[in-house]
Amino acid sequence: MQVHNVGRSATKSRIRPKQRISHTKSRNGCYTCKQRRVKCDEERPTCGACSVRGEDCVFPNPGGPRDQRRRQPHLSLSRSSFDSVQLQAREKTTDVPFRPLYFNAASPDEPQNVDSQSTSSLNMSDLNLLQHYILHTSKKMTLHKIKTVVWERVIPEMAAANEFLMHLVLALAGLDILTSRDICVRNDQGSSKPFIAASVPQLQSIMGHHQQGLAGLQEALCATSEPDAEVLLAGSMLVVGFAFASFGIKDLDPSAHTFQDTLSSDSASPSPLLNVGTLHIQWLHLVRGVTSILRQFWPTLRKCRLRALLFSNHANEDWKLCEEQVRSSVVPSRYIHSGRLRKFATGANHSISKLRDLYASLRLSAGFDDGIETSPSIATPHSDQSGNVGSVSLEPYEKAIGVVEDLYMRILYVMHMKPLDCHASSDLEIQTDIEDAAVSSWPHLLPEEFIFSLDPQGNFDRMQGVGVVILAHLYLAIAILDEVWYYGKRCDIEIYKINTLIGGLGDTKLISLMEWPIDVIQ
């Protein structure tokens, strides 16, 4: 036995040890990566590995003076390079002002119990809102699992360290509670009265949080120092979500209207007294402002913790690779069970053709043939911002119709894809892919002149009617996402408003164009 052991030892002594592959060690990585024995990318305050796993990321204290002196030249060079990239991005970007929404909301009768200096003084009601956001609202902000992690973990973590983000989170959660309870109450007529009485003070608190959040966001945007792009993006996304969820709330003054009366009157049977001023146009400028932030800080944001929200796999022109099939209006309906999706799939191409015919008729009324390439204009009775009566160019309307067409083609292309699981209901998978086509980002594609034409300018005329009809078709691309709480049913309200406006205008061609959007959402 001993001889055998000696032979084994001799054999081992003759074997040369393996050479380990050299690599650069992550000496300044976080404790979590060190414990898991993986390389840390040293992104602060949360590295990429911890961000994906949703774990706490704690870095060791910086080294001594000698270590700092050794790394200082590299940091300076990196900072200089970063500043030059940011400067070039700003020079190439046409700034679009960030215009937050304005609500006609009365100030609360009692001051809010929210300390203006710190978020650590949240009262019990605020803590309930925060709990609701983490447990419910964050899980409904998107259909994508990876993006849900951002809403559920990253944004609350950022809000815990930033006051105005916390206010925006609480406001969004409160609006989610109101809209969700309103749906439940309308399904149970017997419990509607007690809920209305209980919702009034809660609405005041929600608007208090929203207004404080907007004030903080505006202050951050106007800061003279280098802004935190990640915080600006988080605040912008929360405000946009609140804007969509607030569709149908024509007046947030609790002393004049209850939330129940306002919402039900707009969604169930739109009043014939509605005018163009009741349409929510401000959110279009808001989304364009968010897009400006994205372009200005893109080198930073593409690597930040919110980057999952910025990438959409189907926001492209892949549909042109099978354009003939997409334009055939033949959709594999056996995979689609949602009534909205089926109606949209069968009528989208015909609706685009009708919009093109409308534009052709406008060219003819302006005295232009289809063979003339110059941009026509048509006389209108309303005045512009300076008060002068003049003509309106038709080019912005043509470009807006082009946005509708491209958006619809993306959606139809997604519907032509076979579901990954043919044995299960594919509606959720289809809606997830439709969301991944960036269907809610179309405002930044619209010409500024077109958006301006939607704003109230005296009497509601035919050209404004043309604009809001195109707007209704754009809303429809979002309304088919009825699995996302602040999309689907919320956009229905704006489409019903537009239908009421067009009905009052009495233009048969425009009325005919509104029949299909109304049919899809009914």
Image (cartoon, rainbow, N blue to C red):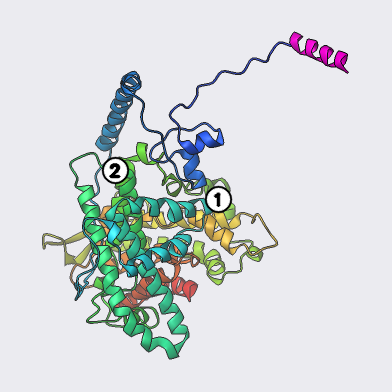
> In front: 104, or 427?
104
Does 115 sit above or below residue 194?
Answer: above
Does 89 sit above or below residue 12?
Answer: below
Whether residue 385 is visible to the viewer of this picture, yes or no, is yes
Residue 75 rendering spot, x and y as whole percentages: 32, 25
Residue 376 rendering spot, x and y as whole percentages: 28, 55
Is residue 382 in the magenta section? no
Q: Quadrant of residue 258?
A: bottom left
Whether residue 452 is visible to the viewer of this picture, yes or no, is no
Dot 2 falls on a residue whose secondary structure is loop
> In front: 189, or 201?
201
Question: What label does residue 323 carry, if any?
Answer: 1
Question: What label does residue 182 carry, if any?
Answer: none
Q: Residue at x 47, y 73 (%)?
A: 521
In the picture, measured across the screen, residue 60 lies left or right of residue 4, that is left
Q: Which residue is mark 2?
A: 228
Q: Quadrant of residue 69?
A: top left
- Span highlighted in magenta in the image: 1-14
| Amino acid at the residue labelled 2 | Asp
Q: Residue at x 76, y 8 (%)?
A: 14
> In front: 437, or 498?
437
Dot 1 falls on a residue whose secondary structure is helix
For disc 1, the neighbor class at 10 Å (few under 14, some 14 to 19, many from 20) is: few
Q: Dividing the image into 4 quarters, which one contains the N terminus?
A: top right
In the picture, measured across the screen, residue 518 lies left or right of residue 432, that is left
Residue 238 rendering spot, x and y as whole percentages: 35, 57
- Farthest front residue in view: 2
